[in-house]
Amino acid sequence: MRLSRQRRMVLDLLWSEASHLSARDIFEKLNARGRHIGHTSVYQNLEALQSAGVIECLDRANGRLYGYRSDPHSHLTCLDSGQIEDLDIELPEDLLRSIEERTGYRIESYTLQLNGRPVAEPD
């Protein structure tokens, strides 16, 4: 894939933010930084980067979010704020084997989607 100036702008933003952003967020942040790019160009470049496996795309009820990582990893979503945190989790081998035995499938990779709320600190 050719890394055009616009694709580089989108990637640089995702890497510097290290979070999950909507196409609109990306458009607004780039333009606020003086990096003029149109809505259509943002969407086209996000699609190309995702199709090439360079970035991730999360489908959520309120739309798609794009992240800077493309490697297998899990997510923790805050049920209060909607903030998504990337997690690197390794499940115990005995749990994976148990799942394989119950399902008849050999697990080759996995990602987890965890949802929760911050634990209140005791006074």
Image (cartoon, rainbow, N blue to C red):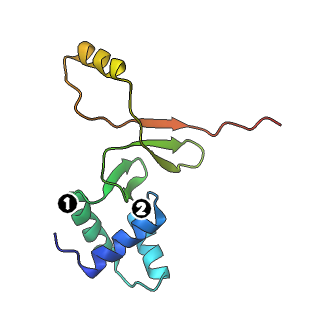
Q: Quadrant of the N terminus?
A: bottom left
Disc 1 residue type (three-letter):
Ala
Q: Residue at x 22, y 65 (%)?
A: 48
Q: With respect to residue 86, does 7 lie above or below?
A: below
Q: Position of residue 83 (x, y in %)?
A: 53, 51
Which mark, residue 52? 1
Measuring 45% from the left and 86% from the top, which residue is drawn there? 34
Structural distance between the alpha carbons of marks 2 and 1: 18 Å
What crowding class fits label 1: few (fewer than 14 Cα within 10 Å), some (14-19), or many (20 or more)? few
Dividing the picture into quadrants, the one containing residue 23 is bottom left
Q: Earlier in the sequence, mark 2 or mark 1?
A: 2
**Residue at 39% across, 56% down:** 65
Mark sitting on residue 22: 2
Q: Quarter of the image containing the C terminus?
A: top right
Could you tell me if residue 35 is visible in this image? yes
Which element carries disc 1, helix, strand or loop? loop
